[in-house]
Amino acid sequence: MSTPSPVFVAGTGRSGTSQLADILGEHPLIHRIPIETRFIVDPGGLRDLADALTIRCDPIVGEDALRRLGDMLTVRLPGRLGRDRGYTVPMAIGERHYWDAVGRLWSELVACTYDEAVPAAGARHADWPAGPFEPQRHRRALPRYFSDRRDLLTILRRAVDTMFGGAAADAGKPGWCEKTPFNLLCMDFLWELVPEATIVHIKRHPVAVVASHVDQPWAPSTVDGALAWLKPVYDRWLTWKTTADLTGRRYVEVRAEDLAADWPGQRRALFARLGVDDHATRSTFEPHRLDNRKDQFDPATRGYVERSLEGVIPAMGYG
């Protein structure tokens, strides 16, 4: 079978995205980027930059987008270990591939730089000289304006290929898989950036997703808080899906419960939809790992969650 297309894994979070990405990464043709890279869809990443240097471009908006991307790529991602894996993004991708891609971006995205004079802190009150440690210059960067958005996307795609493709090549695999749950809400941009990509959306019963969010240190610890976190995600996703044209798109939707109920058969079907041969992976979906949320809520709380999500649950394919 042919080399697999790039794969993005998407979901609400706590729906099985990590487990699914691990499984895909155990296939001999697919390398899993072992961390949520975040620089494509997060605020300040490539998705924001694409608008800031095209349809929203002016010197202020463009510089702000460049500065936020620079902070993300050179400060935040290299300096923060992943919560679950213990890698920084450059470590997960490979330092050489990461910094090669980042270094090339600036020459392709920046039209020019210059130094702007910064007045001394007391300049408005008297003729005070700048203090010995006050910055006297502020570095500014003017963005390139891309009247043809495709030119910018070519540059951004090349950076992604350098990072993810390089990491896959180091692993001896021709394809790659990247998992960030909120890829779910950015599918249009992901296909704009990587037209041949397959996006795999893994779903789990919304009540179980709420229950799991309540137990996470990064999410609200109350049911109402978890609902406030998740309800807009579900609403945005369902609104998008009713209007999106998926004709010709490589989109795969699976339910975690179905994968657990018939893992060998569902695995074969999943790999077939990705265009690769079946492979018996070490990781699996198992019923007991999904059932552990069934009794987390008492009947009254579960009923409250179900009423709060009464339109979402059937729309996501659950009774």
Image (spheres, rainbow, N blue to C red):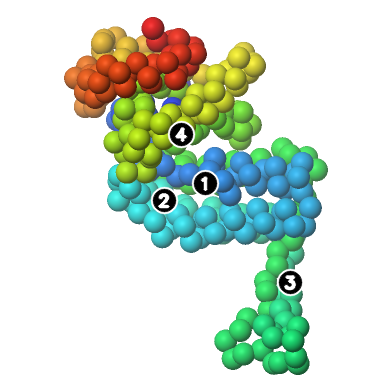
Q: Secondary structure at mark 2?
A: helix
Q: Kindly indicate the quadrant of the structure image that contains residue 271.
A: top left
Q: Kindly indicate the quadrant of the structure image that contains residue 263.
A: top left
Do the CB atoms of the residues marked 4 and 1 lie less than 8 Å apart? Answer: no
Question: Residue shown at 70%/58% (left/top)?
Answer: 63
* Image coordinates for residue 46, horizontal then vertical, percent: 59, 45
Q: Amino acid at mark 1?
A: Phe
Q: Which is nearer the N-term, disc 4 or disc 1?
A: 1
Q: Which is nearer the N-term, disc 3 or disc 1?
A: 1
| Measured Cα–Cα span from mark 3 to mark 4 | 42 Å
The residue lying toward the viewer, choosing from 300 and 156, is 300
Please tell me whether residue 112 is drawn above or below residue 39 in the rendered image: below
Q: Amino acid at mark 3?
A: Tyr
Single out the mark in the foreground, 2 or 4: 4
* Image coordinates for residue 246, horizontal then vertical, percent: 60, 16
Do the CB atoms of the residues marked 2 and 4 lie less than 8 Å apart? Answer: no
Question: Residue shown at 31%/15% (left/top)?
Answer: 257
Q: Secondary structure at mark 3?
A: strand
Residue 89 tag number: 2
| Measured Cα–Cα span from mark 3 to mark 1 | 26 Å
Q: Which is nearer the N-term, disc 2 or disc 4?
A: 2
Q: Which is nearer the N-term, disc 2 or disc 1?
A: 1
Residue 229 tag number: 4
Residue linked to disc 3: 114
Name the image quarter holding the N terminus: top left
Q: Amino acid at mark 2?
A: Val
The residue lying toward the viewer, choosing from 260 and 215, is 215
Do the CB atoms of the residues marked 2 and 1 lie less than 8 Å apart? Answer: yes
| Measured Cα–Cα span from mark 4 to mark 1 | 21 Å
Residue linked to disc 1: 39
